[in-house]
Image (tube, helix red, strand yellow):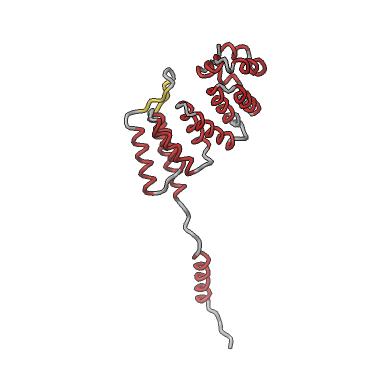
Amino acid sequence: MHTSVTSDTRLGMWIWWIALSWADKPLPDLGPELARVEWARLDLQLTQGCQLAPLLGVVTCQDGVVDKVVARIDAFSRAVVRDAGLEYLAGLAYRYDGRRGRARRRYEAAVALDPTYDAAWYDLGELHLVGGRLDEAEAAFAKVAELVADGEKAWVGPWRLAEVAASRGDAEAFETHIKAALQDGFTFRSIAGLPNWKAFYADPRLRDTFDKLLTVYATPEVRNSLR
């Protein structure tokens, strides 16, 4: 017996197949997209509320700006999703405000959520270096060197590793990292006259190696700026 299929039946079957095809598809994860929108909004709020004071070499923020930004990040994390970018932004806010301990913890949270977050590794390494935690600084900057191995910023990781080596008075490691940085685009002009590099140049453990590098790779003006 032949059974005809009406247009209504075909429509019903089509809807049924569509329903089946989507039944096992997860809903799109809106958390990361919402986090990006929130990051842009809070980054603008932080940028507008904090300014660099060139003469002091520090960032000054309007009263309450940092705490408001961090409170919003924490509220978003509880209500929506924890996000590496927002944790990094909280760390940056605390760093602007001089609260280095809190900044460090937020940077650590950022790299725990996203181990490839090179900016968070960089800032974390800088805090460790400033705090004299050289082993931790070395590990963080080694991650930067690994993650940013190509492109115009590839020299940044080796350069900061050279600073760690110089802080230890390790001339051999200092030379190795500086040469790697030079191959990736570093120039001694970028550190001309910097106080910490003046201190490195004054270190008798580094002087011979430093002089050799400056003779080959730097101008007399750069060399004089470090004396």
Q: Residue at x 43, y 47 (%)?
A: 34
Q: Looking at the image, which is closer to me, 91 or 212?
A: 212
Classify 157 as above or below 34. above
In the rendered image, the residue lying farthest to the left is 63
Q: Looking at the image, which is closer to me, 34 or 183?
A: 183
Q: Position of residue 66 (x, y in %)?
A: 36, 33
Residue 64's quadrant in the figure? top left
Q: How many marks?
A: 0
Q: Position of residue 59 (x, y in %)?
A: 41, 25
Quarter placement of the N terminus: bottom right
Quarter placement of the C terminus: top right
Q: Looking at the image, which is closer to me, 128 or 79?
A: 128
Is 220 on the left or on the right of 84, as rendered? right
In the rendered image, the residue lying farthest to the right is 216
Q: Position of residue 194 (x, y in %)?
A: 52, 18
Classify 102 as above or below 1. above
In the rendered image, the residue lying farthest to the bottom is 1
Is 32 on the left or on the right of 79, as rendered? right
Residue 73's quadrant in the figure? top left
Q: Residue at x 39, y 45 (%)?
A: 77
Classify 132 as above or below 40. above
Q: Position of residue 51 (x, y in %)?
A: 41, 26
Classify 102 as above or below 56. below
Q: Looking at the image, which is closer to me, 46 or 158?
A: 158
